[in-house]
Image (cartoon, helix red, strand yellow):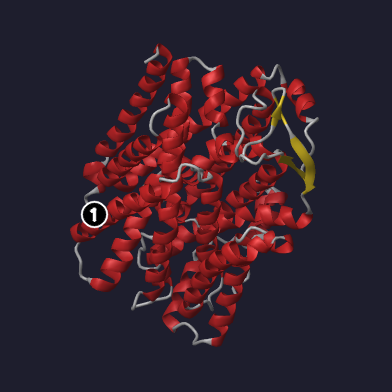
Amino acid sequence: MESGDFLVMLAMLIYFIVVISIGFIYARRSNSSASEYFLGGRKVGPWFTALSAEASDMSGYLLMGLPGLAYWCGASDVGWTCIGLAIGTYLNWKLVAERLRRYSIKAGDAITVPGFFSKRFHDEKNIVGTVCAVIILIFFCVYVGSCFVTCGRLFNTLFGLSYSTMMILGALIVFLYTLVGGYLSVVATDFVQGCLMFFALAVVVVGTVVAASGFDNAVAFLSDIPGFLSMTSIAVPTVGSDGLQVVEDGMPLFDSAASYGLLTIISTMSWGLGYFGMPQILVRFMGVRSNEEVKVSRRIAIVWVVVSMACAVGIGIIGRAVIPGALLTNPDAETIFIVLSRMILPSFVCGVVVCGILAASMSSASSYLLITGSSVAENIYRGIFKKNATDNQVLVVSRITLVVVLLFGIFVAFDENSSIFGVVSYAWAGLGASFGPLMLFSLYWRRTNKYGAVAGMLGGAAMVLIWHNLIKPIGGIFGIYELLPAFLTSCILIVLVSKLTKEPDASVYAEFDTYMEDEPVLEADSLEKAIEANAVEPTEVAVEFFEKEPVL
């Protein structure tokens, strides 16, 4: 083994030891009860909440999927996706975070997303929670697989090691610290991993600009590629019969740029809608220590997301100027972050930086495993099969579920040619359309009932499958991202079915009204006095006014 490879592996070994140690540190506290294991006892502070939420959300696609997409076809697709994600992140923290924490406590102290939906609608038969848990199980198995793909591809690209062997090793490490440490372990490791991801992106984007001999030189080179830097057209690599991009005299060839119209832009930005239904983020809202700390978490999260995505896109775009003809397929393009790290950084620093990729995939995979395990154990096992199950029995079922999801994720990940971005986009659409509309209606519309909830979840999930596999291949106006039509379908079904079926019980209305009364309200007199005393800015009053949603 070369000395450079040894130093890279040493840095990665230290990282593995750290994350596994965190799991054992929190093991005793996490295993004291189901609430501690699944939600950390709602005692997590704003920094851990913010970075954990975003690190678990930004899986391998942040350091591999986004840079790879930018390298392959330029700024438009990845740019509008990131704009939609940034807006969605802000709105999710603004509209959902504080309300969900309050309501989840009010609704029987729910500790899982399926549990919240069941208790929100007083669903004694637990039909809502069961449907929710099954959907989580299906789409999170796919999501976990995408994270394992990242691990395998990382070691294969760095050291030429067996993709399958290293993918399984990465999966087992994630499984180990999730199994032992529970939610607190996941949150703590996510905090470390979020910091590491931020550092890695910043270091590599600066190094990439230097390797390109400056930003201006990179822009001058990329301007010659049709549509590469445009936000209204998209670059189209010339692909030969062998499936590789054609290269002449060391330079990649591109066809004429394709149009990137308004409908495509709206479709791409609809990625942001997915945030309202991401269980790995929603559960962080439920576990934050206090409502007052949500605002602090929101600011941290927005800064982290915007800066991180900007660096990821910059790495992919400028990387095309640094090594223009090196990565000749879309899956190969997703290794641009790794290739540049090896090229521009000292070996040990490279090892630290590429641990950011492991951090991204492992933080997400651990969250997906934990949420799937908690959903099945709490909402299917204890919710249906054994209502008087003890916490120890629930934890056992949860861990059995972790094993099942681990094995299925490994099975999904065995196809090393699958696109990380493609796999993530499919699962993101499924979860976002199934739970996003229902979460918003549950928090803001008192007339929503359990029949509408089930119809919305099933309709959203079904439309993702139908649109992706049957309608989207038609192309044209039907080629939009499946999340948008599925999200709208779910909204329509929730409203129609809720209106056409029996109203919720009086107890559901009473609980909703009580939860709404907990919303802090500034009276007109106190607002005027606060403005006069310079305690509140008039602009803040205007924002406060427009953010007051009517109770429907």
Whether residue 359 is visible: no
Q: Quadrant of residue 551?
A: bottom right
> Is 340 displayed left or right of 118 in the figure?
right
Q: Is residue 328 visible?
A: yes
Q: Quadrant of the C terminus?
A: bottom right
Q: Amino acid at mark 1?
A: Ser
In which quadrant will I find the N terminus? top left
Q: Is residue 336 above or below residue 396?
A: above
Task: Name the element at disc 1.
Answer: loop
Q: Position of residue 505 (x, y in %)?
A: 44, 83
Give whichever of 471, 380 is nearer the camera.
471
Q: Residues within 10 Å of mark 1 (few under 14, many from 20)?
A: some
- In the image, taking residue 168 as reference, residue 29 lies left or right, namely left
- In the image, is residue 197 above or below residue 451? above
Tell me the residue at 65%/47% (across/down).
Answer: 81
What x and y, as percent, mark residue 398? 27, 56
| Point 39% across, 12% down: residue | 3
**Number of callouts:** 1
Residue 52 position in % (x across, y down): 44, 43
Q: Residue at x 59, y 35 (%)?
A: 333
When the figure is inspected, residue 357 is found, relative to residue 40, above or below; the finding is above
Q: Which residue is situated farthest in the top direction here?
A: 3
Q: Residue at x 55, y 49 (%)?
A: 422
Residue designated by label 1? 33
Of residues 187 and 68, the one nearer the viewer is 68
